[in-house]
Amino acid sequence: MSKTTTKKAVEEKTPKKVTRKASLTPLTEEKSTKTVIKTSHGKKYLEARKKYDINKLYPLKEAIALVKSTSISKFDGKVETHVLLLESISSVDISFPHLEVSAKKVVILNDAVLAEIKDGKINFNVLIATPATMPKLLPFARILGPRGLMPNPKNGTLTDNPKAAFKKLSVAKTTLKCEKSAPVIHRVVGKVSQPDIELIANIEELIRVIKAPKIKKLVLCATMGPGIKVEVTK
């Protein structure tokens, strides 16, 4: 058998690879990009969901009671709020009346504080100074500046009324801000074990700061529990 005949026989036995162009129809594009996420919940979670109507908007007081009764954790879970807005808003500070927030240590510049700074001891989170005392800090700008501790009129730490600034800045605050990709705010407003009246006050303050007309949907839930939709009075 000649080499040509042998080569032809081998080619006939070897299956040829067929390259097909993908069909670029909307349907196939959707299938190729769509990700299916399967979620599964335990028996306790599913039982908790039977305690309320998932499509109903509940008054705040009733919603909090449901959050507590549907919490399935063995520990003292947190009460979470998930707020969908009509559009994103700028970051805003809020002081909850009944929420433990790590307070910042605020100090007013004096000789004792200045001596500590000279020794490299930075035992504060906020430093307040007056225009008259500000020159004393200039030699330490390289130490305080990178840490964001140099007094500044924009954030109220460089002022002619340091006592008023101290009182204002000493209040424990937290910041509300939207997700980068959506007008949604997530915020813990307390613990499941807290009295209802305290949780109500915290959530009412949240709604007041955000402003009710801007809220499209408000959902409450425990750390381990289903979401309860809350009725927001516009």
Image (tube, grey):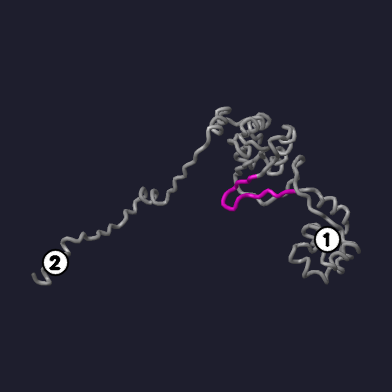
Q: Position of residue 35 (x, y in %)?
A: 44, 48
Look at mark 2 in the image and give the residue it sits on: 8
Residue 158's label in the rendered image is 1
User: Callout 1, which amino acid?
Assistant: Leu
**The image quarter in which residue 73 lies:** top right
* Residue at left offset 73%, top offset 46%: 94
- Residue 134 higher or lower than 165, as above or below: below
Q: Residues within 10 Å of mark 2 (few under 14, many from 20)?
A: few
Disc 2 on helix, strand or loop? helix
Q: Nearer the viewer, residue 204 or 233?
A: 204
Name the spot of residue 130 as percent of width and height, x first.
87, 62
Q: Which stretch is magenta?
A: 173-186
Q: Are marks 1 and 2 in contact (CB under 8 Å)?
A: no
Looking at the picture, tell me which residue is in the foreground, 207 or 138: 138
Pick the quarter of the image with the C terminus: top right
- Residue shown at 70%/50% (left/top)? 175
**Is 114 left or right of 211, judged from the image as shown?**
right
